[in-house]
Amino acid sequence: MTGTPEAPVTAGQEQKTDGSAPSATQTTASARAGAAAGASLQELAKRHLWMHFTRMSGYEQQEVPIIARGEGCYVWDEHGKRYLDALSALFCVNIGHGRADIAQAGAEQAKELGFFTNWSYAHPPAIELAARVASLAPGDLNRVFFTSGGSEAVETAVKLARQYFKLTGRPNKTKLIAREIAYHGTSLGALSATGITELREPFEPLTPGASHVPATNSYRLPDGVDESYFAEAIAHRIEFEGPHTVAAVILEPIQNAGGCFTPPEGYFQRVREICDTYDVLLISDEVICAWGRLGEWFGAIRYDYEPDIITTAKALTSAYAPMGAVIATDRVAEPFMQGTNSFTHGFTFGGHPMCAAIAMANLDAFEREGILENVRQNEGRFREMLDSLRDIPIVGDVRGAGYFHALELVKHKETKESFSDEECETLLRGFLSGELFRRGLICRADDRGDPVVQLSPPLIAGPEQFEEMEEILRAVLTEASERMHVRDEAMEYHSHRG
Ligand SMILES: Cc1ncc(COP(=O)(O)O)c(C=O)c1O
């Protein structure tokens, strides 16, 4: 706001160059231009920009990281410093940065038809993209509903499941089962699926009917059970809730939050069986795991299961435009296609023609440039590099698949003891996040579960980028071990004896 006390007086004054008395709107406009001209981006960011999931006060004493340019696997900040973007700008820019050619498809589309809605109307880009997405999706997931992002996709899937059962004569099937620590978005319906207490609590009460089962954390498998426990927990929860009240189970192929929890062998096959037994829809939330992240078009293909609904977003356009999608099987879509029925749900921008054209150009580039093949060819080397870091005392576990991996950090390798909340604060926010960034690596140090460092580079990355990651990770994690007094007990034991 230009009227805030912090607005620089000089900036406003500088604008008044012709000596005339400006009108109220002119004053506001000129003060705005003045603020932009007179103040640095840093000052403007600190004063006006509300960053998401960000402790804004943290930037009172330090710079806001301002990323100004990107090309390939790299981005540059406002000072011209280069960073390896080993997070693909939040699992988004799968094709890499700087692809003006992909964005150009949006400009070309705008010449033809800049916008029209999918509310009662169709247009060529949405039709063509829907057909293409259906052709890439597994099984008979043939019906595509577009959204503007991932939360909207999850929100849509949850509503779709509820209305599906209303239309097919089972109106009490409304509940949703998700996994603890999983992130499924922030809108109130999607947030009810999200299993992260700190994100839920400030907004309670949430949409009712959601409950959570344990994530597939095989590294910390509870005593006395084997990995079949994870799928059976879903059956148990459905029984507990009453099968006639449960509409859907929502799961990511690999769960992001908590640090890339992979499914145990046979997990999704058993979950599919459970869902069929209890007539519950299986939603595969592939906001991250689709579009090559796991070396396939969809995570469900990698793990060989057929969900009833897929939710996706992010890399559908490689984030050159905001777009998401919900893909439903013929069975789920069918009741909505009959008589006077309709899915009474929509978003103005769903299927936006420019976004759809950009998605088509993105998928063209994926095919032309062998993006999936690059992941398949290189994921072994990526994993080898990460596994080589296990000799650092603080690295307890390495997990993931494709170009989607996490390192879990522990206090004691043998006991797998984790860090307390205060220690996580010191380790992650007090050291790791800042130090990795300072050394030129963008990745994610996260403690929504136990502390992890997540790595998810653009799908065009290869050995050169892995080497760069290794160098920085090794130095920073070794220093983190020392700072947190984590020692390799096995090595110490041997050296004492020696
Ligand atoms: C699995 C999953 N679902 C849903 C979302 C929400 O997507 P968005 O941030 O586009 O709303 C995310 C975001 O990261 C996600 O990872």
Image (tube, rainbow, N blue to C red):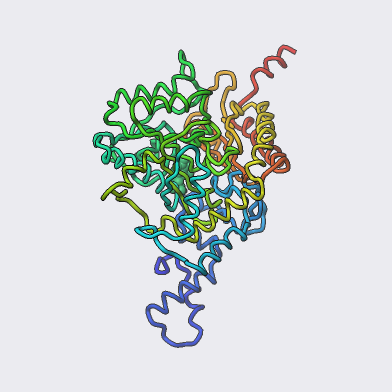
Q: Nearer the viewer, residue 409 or 273?
A: 273
The quarter of the picture where the N terminus appears is: bottom left
Residue 183 percent across, percent down from the top left: 44, 39
- Give the left or right position of residue 491, taking residue 283 as reference: right
- Give the left or right position of residue 129, taking residue 481 as reference: left
Residue 221 percent across, percent down from the top left: 49, 20
Place residue 471 in its image quadrant: top right
Residue 164 percent across, percent down from the top left: 31, 40
The residue drawn where x is 26% and y is 50% is 340
The quarter of the picture where the C terminus appears is: top right
Q: Is residue 116 above or below residue 461?
A: below
Q: Residue furthest right?
A: 498
Q: Nearer the viewer, residue 457 or 376?
A: 376
Q: Residue furthest front?
A: 339
Residue 95 percent across, percent down from the top left: 61, 50
- Give the left or right position of residue 192, taking residue 112 as reference: left
The answer to whether residue 202 is seen in the rendering is no
Q: Nearer the viewer, residue 365 or 475?
A: 365
The answer to whether residue 454 is seen in the rendering is yes
The residue drawn where x is 50% and y is 63% is 44
The residue drawn where x is 62% and y is 30% is 481
